[in-house]
Amino acid sequence: MTKVLVATEKPFAEAAVNQIKSTFEKAGYDCRFFEKYESQDDLKKAVADADALIIRSDKITEEIMDAAPELKIVVRAGAGFDNVDLAAATAHNIVVMNTPGQNSNAVAELVLGMMVFQARNHFNGKPGTELKGKKLGIHAYGHVGKNVARIAKGFGMEVFAFDPFVDKADIEADSVSVFDNVEEMYSVCDYVSLHIPANKHTIKSINYTLLSKMKEGATLINTARKEVIDEEGLLKMFNKRNDFRYIADIAPGNREDIEKEFGDRCFFTPKKMGAQTAEANVNAGIAASNQIIAFLEKGDTTFKVN
Ligand code: 3PG
């Protein structure tokens, strides 16, 4: 019997767990859940007999693959796959996939929610500001960026984007204005929302040089990855510019220092929660399950990333 392991340090919502179970039951697969585990050693033991793996931000290293001799496919139920060693997967003949777009509305709703929270002074009762009429710059126009644009327009924001990898015409079709120069976008927008993946080109790319271009009173929102921020540059920006605000779903390593010094100009969620909705978990979990079945039954490699 084909064995699927759902290894989620941050578990899916109950509705998603039930639907994943019944999808695999119908296919005649054995599906086990390994949730809230505490160490890579525990994960290593759990993957020993797995043919297929569903994960979230769980780290899948070469060591984990070595401990999983039967493993044929890993599906990251979500967008970013920087937590999987792709080269090692290829060397182990393991297919890696993601489920693009399935959790993007959840992340986009959190972006706007956090923006309102910051604009209203963390709901402390003092007069804040409105989003209507403000300029929002979307840094990378993928599935999340597109949803952010849609929702921001509902707030009456003016929406801009920078993404050299997406056709300008496709972005403009959403009535979003395109910047060809990232620094220019940072310099005119009241809010900049990051949606870039973490890879060798983007890690620490949001540095002081770029941040210092931000408009007076601007807010940077990060629901993408902690690694894309140059944390020394971020600290410098907070120190040099007392009008700058930073809100993130993935707190920087120097979280305590920043919160202590600049509490009202920053906000960090306690745990990454952009994709933590029942709907996103169901969408991504079901997509991952179906992709595993389609791959193992028919060799379908749509969404393969390695
Ligand atoms: C993603 O890349 O899909 C998001 O960052 C969500 O990650 P999560 O599944 O760990 O919440």
Image (cartoon, helix red, strand yellow):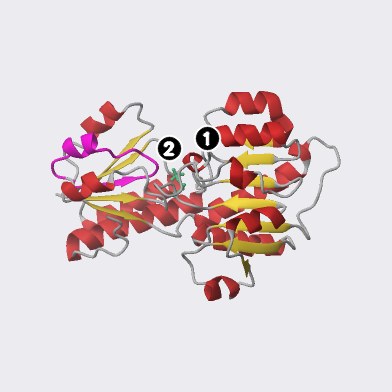
Split into 4 quadrants, where in the image is the C terminus?
bottom left
User: Which residue sits at x=21%, y=30%?
Assistant: 45
Q: Does 221 sit left or right of 21 as displayed?
A: right
User: Which residue sits at x=42%, y=49%?
Assistant: 201
Question: Furthest-front residue in view?
Answer: 209
Does 57 appear in magenta?
yes
- Residue tagged by mark 2? 10
Does 111 appear in magenta?
no
Q: Position of residue 75 (x, y in %)?
A: 31, 51
Rendered view: 156 above or below 18: below
Give the CA separation, mark 2 to mark 1.
9 Å
Q: Please say if the residues under marks 2 and 1 sit with CB atoms less than 8 Å apart.
A: yes
Q: Does 119 sit left or right of 176 as displayed?
A: right
**Quadrant of the image occupied by residue 304:** bottom left
Instruction: Provide the secondary structure element on which disc 1 rests.
Output: loop
Q: Position of residue 143 (x, y in %)?
A: 50, 61
In the image, which disc is placed on residue 271? 1
Disc 2, ligand 1: is the CB inside 8 Å? yes
Q: Nearer the viewer, residue 26 or 63?
A: 63
Q: Report the span colored magenta.
A: 51-70
Number of numbered discs visible in the structure rendering: 2
Instruction: Provide the secondary structure element on which disc 2 rests.
Output: loop
Would residue 10 be visible to someone looking at this image? yes
Q: Amino acid at mark 2?
A: Lys
User: Which residue sits at x=38%, y=57%?
Assistant: 99
> Which numbered disc flags the more N-terminal residue, 2 or 1?
2
Q: Amino acid at mark 1?
A: Lys
Q: Nearer the viewer, residue 256 or 69?
A: 256
